[in-house]
Amino acid sequence: MLITVGFPYSFMVLHTVPARKSANDLSPIGPDGPKSPQALFAGRQPSHKGPCTRPREVVLSSLCRFLRKIYTASYLHTQETAQAMENVVSYHALLLPHDDRLPHLVTLATSPLNVTGVPTIAEPFRCGKTPHPEIFMEFLADGAGISWAYRVIDRLCGMNQGFAKPYILYYGAVSRDGMSFPVNRYCHGLQGADFFQRDRAWRGNLVIVKYADPEYSAMMNISIADFPIVKNYLQTHRME
């Protein structure tokens, strides 16, 4: 490009500067004829308007903020989980499956329950904990709240005085499909043909928990040594 300064009656050439192409010059025709596709986009510069064309510093900053949010959320979730796990207390319980499996010990989880100021509290909750026998029960209704029932085992037939350390038997009460739970085969075998009644049979998986006193103020671990007492009770008692 020729730059001149005009004076009256004459022109003076100051400097000759080559024509500068625009950074985004997409004209298909060049001084030597049509441009090739490579030459057409060779001089184009990023516009920095899209997320994939931002400067490197901006991308790194956004990535750091994203990773910081992930770390913070993960840390808070870990803290909440750890705090919840500290409140979960487990005890050994006795499980009597409804099928051909033999009775065996399981670990029963409990969660804290605030019973302060409640005048009348059912036996399972007097210890300030909510037991979760539903973990070991099959065919229970989903989303129905507490779908199990319980029976207090505080004495055997012929006893005038109750146990110093009683038991509570938990069994399913609300089934998923509205039908009856399957008959507990182990209890059926215990009661025999003379005592067994199908309409009052023990059904589903049974979970037995031991308590430390007649007031049911604390749970404790059950053991195989308690099994004869539970067996005697199930042999002489039907489901109401």
Image (spheres, rainbow, N blue to C red):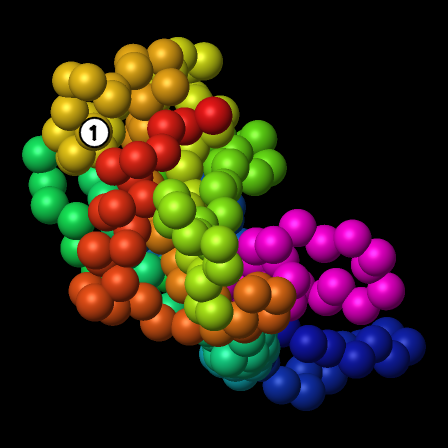
The three-letter code of the residue at mark 1 reads: Gln
Residues drawn in magenta: 110-134
Dot 1 corresponds to which residue? 191
Query: Considering only vertical position in the picture, is 27 above or below 56?
Result: above
Q: Tell me what residue is drawn at x 19 percent, y 18 percent.
A: 194
Q: Relative to residue 178, is residue 99 drawn left or right?
A: left
Quadrant of the rendering where the N terminus is positioned: bottom right
Q: Quick one: label 1, few (<14), some, or many (20+) residues within 10 Å?
A: some
40 w.r.t. 74: above or below: above
Is residue 121 within the magenta segment? yes
Asked if residue 151 lies left or right of residue 205, the reply is: right
- In the rendered image, which quarter is residue 91 located in? bottom left
* Quarter residue 43 falls in: bottom left
User: Residue 150: x and y, percent?
Assistant: 49, 41
Q: Position of residue 157 (x, y in %)?
A: 38, 44
Give the residue displayed 20% in from the left and 29% down from the top: 191
Residue 23 visible, this angle? no
Q: Is residue 64 in view?
A: yes
Between residues 26 and 18, which one lies in front from this camera angle? Answer: 26
Q: Is residue 88 above or below residue 180?
A: below
The residue at 42%/52% (across/down) is 159
Check residue 127 for magenta coloring: yes
Q: Position of residue 72 (x, y in %)?
A: 57, 78
